[in-house]
């Protein structure tokens, strides 16, 4: 996998609005994106949003559009004669500012790069390979774990041949439809891989629940690879949402500095902020060899690898293939989480008006076109990550009850006689739930609450600055973007009421409460179980 930060093709590509002096915010999709089906204005000024992608809107189910299920390979004239298709022509680029001097060439702004980016970009393929490796592992003579065959009828001879022939005819039928243009073979294949994988893993989750709930005690359940389905399904959905979030984050931060008369006063200072943020994402290699995020991810996952090696593995199956797959996927996941630490740190320096970036002029506009003071896109960014956290919380509770019970004595936690065994069990199943609790609380504070604090603080400043002043604005005129309170004719009139009603949260409060409740729900399930 190519680890180069900026290939020549990518460096020269410019996203809409990235050129100097050009504030136009084009929203047209590239030709490779397919039919345009989004229900939204084509003019970005009418749209008032930076958090957008060509899959937005319309009525089609587009889970398989969030990332690429299969790499798109094309032939070239030189070695190695094949190459993978780039992510697109609409790459977010900006002109960096270093030591007060503008660079003449734009650079690509990337939240994630290299192998981790390719893993989430092709999440269905990665999880498909992991699933095949885990599900086929029981055929090895040294593996003492049951496979899917325990739930399937035994087939042999003519029956097995006919079933194989039945399955083999399906791709032929699809190919014939593609030859006459009835379906798009590429998109259909992506859909089959994505939704087929989701269906298989979802069935595996249901079988896992069935095995555990119908047994006299979970510890009596025979080891079976279907118990890994919950982990694989959560990694699949989480990685797909992460990749879409990565693309939106990159475009949002770049385009924010390109818009005139918005919530950024000094575009040059903002580009200096982007320069520092992009440099932090690219990371200086330790000893010239490895990026800190990848070392962090590897070491973090290695801690659990050690615990699982002492115990019975991540799913209590004592299964070497599952152990290796869990370690590799967890290391990649924590590497990406490290990037979010960087993002949250820099975003909060911007929100809290750190002296380094005080010249950016990042501020709240009470009458912004987006209806949330110009902060709606940041609210959507926080919402997307919150959705991923909700999925993670539900999986961890599932893992605690379904997988954790496999090695739990019938007397419960008090039944452990070996302190080491109890410690390993607690690290494997209680530890992730505690980490999730801390992470969910921290995310709520550093995203929703920090944005709210910034909006409320700026609104209060406007109130103090212009309180009691009169202007010459026409009576009854509705406020618009860029208005200040001193332009209102009567501070007791409808304009003043509109200002006081201006939101101080980056999204609808009811929606935000529902989202945060989704984070709390997984935590309430163990508490309710203890009380009952």
Image (cartoon, grey):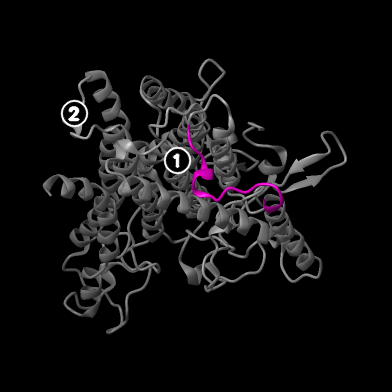
Residue wearing tag 2: 415
Q: Secondary structure at mark 1?
A: helix
**Tag nearer the camera, 2 or 1:** 2
Residue wearing tag 1: 228
Instruction: Please rate how many residues cluster around mark 1, counting C-alpha atoms within 10 Å: few if below 14, some from 14 to 19, many from 20.
Output: many
Q: Is residue 201 magenta?
A: no
Q: Who comes first in sequence, dot 2 or dot 1?
A: 1
Q: Position of residue 508 (x, y in %)?
A: 30, 65
Q: Position of residue 207 (x, y in %)?
A: 42, 50
Q: Position of residue 383 (x, y in %)?
A: 37, 55
Q: Can you see residue 78?
A: yes
How many numbered callouts?
A: 2
Rounded to the nearest angstrom, the CA distance separating label 2 from label 1 is 25 Å
Q: Is residue 184 above or below residue 455?
A: below
Which portion, as a residue range, is magenta?
145-159
Q: Is residue 230 above or below residue 196?
A: above
Prevailing secondary structure class for the magenta stretch in the rendered image: loop
Instruction: Please rate how many residues cluster around mark 2, counting C-alpha atoms within 10 Å: few if below 14, some from 14 to 19, many from 20.
Output: few
404 vs 140, nearest the viewer: 140
328 vs 268, nearest the viewer: 328
Q: Residue at x 37, y 50 (%)?
A: 210
Which of the 4 image quarters holds residue 130?
top right
Q: Residue at x 70, y 58 (%)?
A: 166
29 vs 374, nearest the viewer: 29
Q: Position of residue 189 (x, y in %)?
A: 67, 57
Q: Is residue 427 above or below residue 289?
A: below
């Amino acid at each position: 996998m190519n680890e180069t930060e900026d290939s020549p093709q990518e460096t020269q590509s410019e996203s809409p609005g990235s050129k100097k002096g050009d504030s136009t915010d084009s929203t047209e999709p590239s030709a490779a994106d397919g039919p345009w089906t989004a229900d939204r204005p084509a003019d970005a000024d009418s749209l008032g949003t930076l958090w957008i992608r060509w899959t937005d809107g319309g009525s089609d189910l587009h889970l398989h559009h969030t990332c690429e299920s299969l790499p798109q390979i094309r032939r070239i004239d030189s070695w190695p004669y094949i190459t993978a298709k780039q992510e697109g022509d609409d790459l977010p680029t900006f002109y960096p500012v270093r030591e007060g001097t503008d660079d003449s060439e734009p650079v690509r702004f990337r939240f994630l790069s290299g192998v981790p980016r390719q893993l989430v970009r092709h999440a269905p393929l990665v999880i498909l390979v992991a699933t095949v490796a885990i599900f086929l592992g029981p055929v090895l003579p040294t593996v003492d774990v049951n496979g899917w065959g325990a739930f399937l009828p035994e087939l042999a001879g003519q029956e097995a041949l006919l079933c194989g022939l039945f399955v083999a005819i399906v791709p032929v039928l699809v190919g014939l439809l593609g030859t006459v243009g009835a379906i798009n073979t590429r998109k259909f294949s992506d859909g089959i891989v994505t939704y087929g994988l989701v269906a298989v893993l979802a069935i595996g989750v249901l079988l896992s629940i069935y095995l555990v709930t119908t047994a006299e005690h979970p510890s009596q359940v025979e080891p079976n690879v279907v118990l890994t389905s919950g982990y694989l399904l959560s990694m699949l959905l989480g990685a797909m949402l992460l990749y879409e979030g990565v693309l939106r984050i990159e475009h949002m931060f770049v385009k924010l500095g390109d818009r005139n008369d918005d919530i950024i006063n000094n575009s040059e200072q903002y580009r200096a902020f982007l320069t520092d943020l992009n440099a932090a994402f690219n990371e200086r290699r330790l000893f010239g060899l490895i990026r800190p995020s990848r070392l962090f991810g590897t070491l973090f996952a290695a801690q659990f690898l050690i615990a699982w090696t002492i115990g019975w593995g991540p799913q209590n199956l004592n299964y070497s293939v599952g152990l290796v797959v869990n370690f590799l996927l967890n290391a990649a996941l924590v590497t990406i989480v490290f990037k979010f630490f960087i993002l949250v740190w820099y975003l909060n320096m911007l929100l809290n008006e750190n002296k380094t970036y005080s010249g950016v002029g990042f501020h709240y506009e009470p009458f912004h076109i987006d209806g949330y003071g110009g902060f709606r896109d940041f609210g959507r960014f926080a919402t997307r990550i919150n959705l991923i956290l909700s999925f993670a919380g539900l999986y961890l509770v599932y893992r605690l009850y379904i997988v954790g019970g496999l090695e739990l004595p019938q007397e419960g936690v008090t039944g452990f006689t070996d302190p080491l065994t109890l410690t390993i069990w607690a690290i494997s199943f209680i530890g992730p739930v505690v980490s999730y609790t801390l992470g969910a609380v921290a995310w709520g504070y550093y995203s929703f609450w920090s944005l709210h604090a910034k909006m409320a603080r700026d609104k209060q400043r406007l109130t103090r600055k212009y309180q009691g002043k009169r202007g010459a604005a026409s009576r009854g005129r509705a406020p618009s973007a860029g208005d200040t309170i001193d332009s209102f004719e009567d501070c007791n009139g409808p304009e003043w009421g509109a200002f006081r009603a201006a939101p101080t949260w980056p999204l609808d409060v009811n929606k935000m409460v529902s989202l945060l409740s989704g984070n709390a729900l997984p935590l309430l399930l163990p508490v309710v179980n203890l009380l009952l």
